[in-house]
Image (cartoon, rainbow, N blue to C red):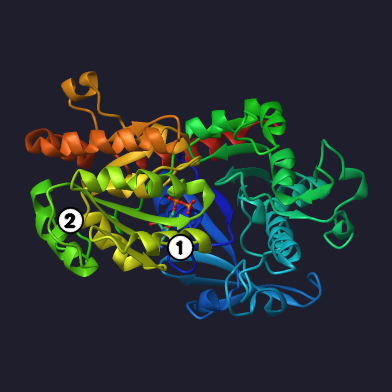
Amino acid sequence: MTSQVTRVLSVASECAPLVKTGGLADVAGALPAALAPLGVEMRTLLPGYPQVIKELKAAQLVAQFHDLFGGSARVLAATAAGLDLLVLDAPHLYDRGAGIYLNEDGLDWSDNAQRFAALSRIASEIANGALTDWQPDVLHCHDWQAGLAPYYLAKSDAANRVRSVITVHNMAFQGLTSVEALEQLEIDETDFTSDGVEYFGKISALKAGLVYADNLTTVSPTYAEELMTPDFGMGLDGVMRARRADLSGILNGIDETIWSPVTDPEIRPYKTPRGKASNKQLLRDEFGLPTSDGPLCVVVSRLTDQKGLDLLLEALPALLERGGQLALLGSGDPALEKAYLAAAEQPNVAVRIGYDEALSHRMMAGGDAILVPSRFEPCGLTQLYGLRYGTLPVVALTGGLADTVIPASPATLARQVATGIQFHPVTAEALTNALGKLCDLYADAKLWAKLQRNAMAHPVGWEHSAQRYATLYSNLTTDPQ
Ligand code: ADP
């Protein structure tokens, strides 16, 4: 336990439950409560999107800026959903409909570079003492949207500069923008080099973070290793290798106050795998699926190339032949949405296109297995929910999926530690084999129940990882600059 309080400013573009498009929001939302018992006082800086502003309680104006990338802005201190927030209220950047990153046509807002450079700029100002009554000891930036904050901080001439960490939740999103924006984004021309913010002729906000932050983390140990390879580093593997000494992988946890089969208000609560049966029946009814002898597989996912769900379409006939079923909830790539809707013409396949948090809980409770065939997966959360709910994960051997699922094998079964199935390489053929193995295991009811118990007992909370972040912050504040 750290004896002294460490103040941390966490900077993120989304934070559950207020605004979420993916796992980053869950992590940003869960970290403050997980860290509080460890002597870390974390405040979260978020953009003032309409859905955030309307939830604020007892908002206080704590800073004002007359010209922040083309308009005036203020920082509001407030609480919402149990979070201690600093909200960047800048209507010219954030007060708009459609998505937080995408416009009505599903395209990136054309000023995304400015919108998140503004967030990063204010983060660095707060780190440098812009608020009269609170200054962080550490600046913790998440993903490209906060990537310029370590740059602005490094370039400021503050004495006793606050130390910074950047966490990569997904290397695929790099915050690229044209070189013409250098001046507008207040980036020094001399920093537009391969050792600085330049990425194949463009400015990369993520690269700025990776180069200028004092410390780098990502969300699983395996992804940390993968990021240093050309296959996964997305052109930044050299930067990651250069920063190897400052890079670590800290696994995401899940918020067990939200994801627990014992207390989940969306489901028929259960403590043992037996309690899943009634949830399974309810789920089949909800999806209009008939009874069947095979496992009911669920998928809750963005429908993108990363998630490998095109491979599942190819492997699906083999699952159905064995009496298996599929219930999928997701949205994204229109071609994949269309292909899944077509697949759902079959009797044992049901598909919901959309985003539905409550339904995702019922799927975890009612499914027998959760499928995550990702081509790459920094950490992945749905396999962790699956473990907690006794819904066995069938996952690709990559990133956080490799770190969180213990594959069934004669040795792991004998030691009673197996929690799911892993497959490699990430091909339709290997997935087909994995689904065959799933059906074999499922057919042995006694063995299946054992696997479910192992899964439900596997730790998936924040405890261990929160301790690692707390240690990292504490090391940063005590290390000589
Ligand atoms: P990523 O961040 O790459 O999308 P993760 O597995 O880390 O993947 O996190 C995804 C999060 O979003 C999980 O909490 C998952 O339950 C949720 N999610 C994804 N798609 C949907 C959907 N269509 N409906 C409800 N929740 C979803």
Secondary structure under tag 1 reads: helix
User: Residue type at mark 1?
Assistant: Glu
Left or right: 256 as drawn, with respect to 368? right
Does residue 1 show up? no
Secondary structure under tag 2 reads: loop
Give how far across and how far down residue 320 sits, in percent.
24, 48
Q: Which residue is mark 2?
A: 262
Say which of 370 and 142 sits in front. Answer: 370
User: Residue type at mark 2?
Assistant: Val
Give how far across and how far down residue 198 sits, in percent.
82, 44
Alpha-carbon distance for marks 1 and 2?
A: 33 Å
The tag on residue 337 is 1
Left or right: 342 as drawn, with respect to 306? left
Say which of 200 and 51 sits in front. Answer: 200
**What residue sits 76% from the left and 48% below the top?**
151
Outermost residue toward the top?
A: 411
For residue 424, above or below residue 357: above
